Amino acid sequence: MRQTALDLHPPIPGDPPPFYNTQRLVGEAKARATQRASGQELAVLRAYEDIWPAGATPSTIHERMKTAAPLTSIRRAVSNLTKRGLLRKTRRQRIGPFGALEHVWEAKR
């Protein structure tokens, strides 16, 4: 399996959680949701690494991943990866699927 920046920078205390438990899940349901969200972060980071250095908007990543996860989950992953220093928000913007400008992110190398 290919190594990513996520492998080189495992979570440390103070990092944002991969899953925000707004549904107040407990036990196994919470564990599954957290694992699924962690997997989304890895998939998002890999997508950014694969298209680097061009960068992409979260909606472009969502479209290319062909995932059933909602766009908000991809945006959460992008935010978390940015806070962890693995992605960088650029000044570039592109028109998103809803006609609004979206910032472009890229993988830090």
Image (tube, helix red, strand yellow):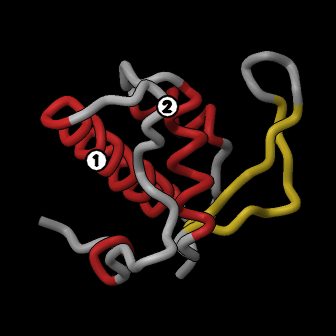
Question: Looking at the picture, does residue 33 appear above or below residue 103?
Answer: above
**Residue 21: numbered disc:** none
Q: Position of residue 31 (x, y in %)?
A: 20, 42
Read off the residue under disc 1. Answer: 39
Q: Say left or right for 79 vs 103.
A: left
Dots 2 and 1: beta carbons under 8 Å?
Answer: no
Q: Say left or right for 25 vs 72.
A: left
Read off the residue under disc 2. Answer: 22
Question: Looking at the picture, does residue 48 appear above or below residue 62?
Answer: below
Estimate how packed mark 1 is, as few (under 14), some (14 to 19) or many (20 or more) residues with alpha carbons within 10 Å: some
Q: Image point 64% across, 56% down: which residue?
A: 55
For the residue marked with disc 2, what is the amino acid?
Thr
Q: Position of residue 60 (x, y in %)?
A: 60, 35
For the residue marked with disc 1, what is the amino acid?
Gly
Task: Name the one closer to the observer, 29 or 100.
Answer: 29
Task: Name the one closer to the observer, 97 or 78.
Answer: 78
Q: Image point 62% across, 40% down: which residue?
A: 58
Q: Position of residue 101 (x, y in %)?
A: 88, 34
Q: Image point 19% across, 68% down: which residue?
A: 2
Q: Image point 42% across, 78% down: which residue?
A: 13
Question: Of marks 2 and 1, which one's residue comes earlier in the chain?
Answer: 2
Gap between marks 2 and 1 measured at Cα? 19 Å
Estimate how packed mark 2 is, as few (under 14), some (14 to 19) or many (20 or more) residues with alpha carbons within 10 Å: few
Question: Looking at the picture, does residue 102 appear above or below residue 50?
Answer: above
Task: Name the one closer to the observer, 7 or 83.
Answer: 83
Q: Position of residue 94 (x, y in %)?
A: 82, 39
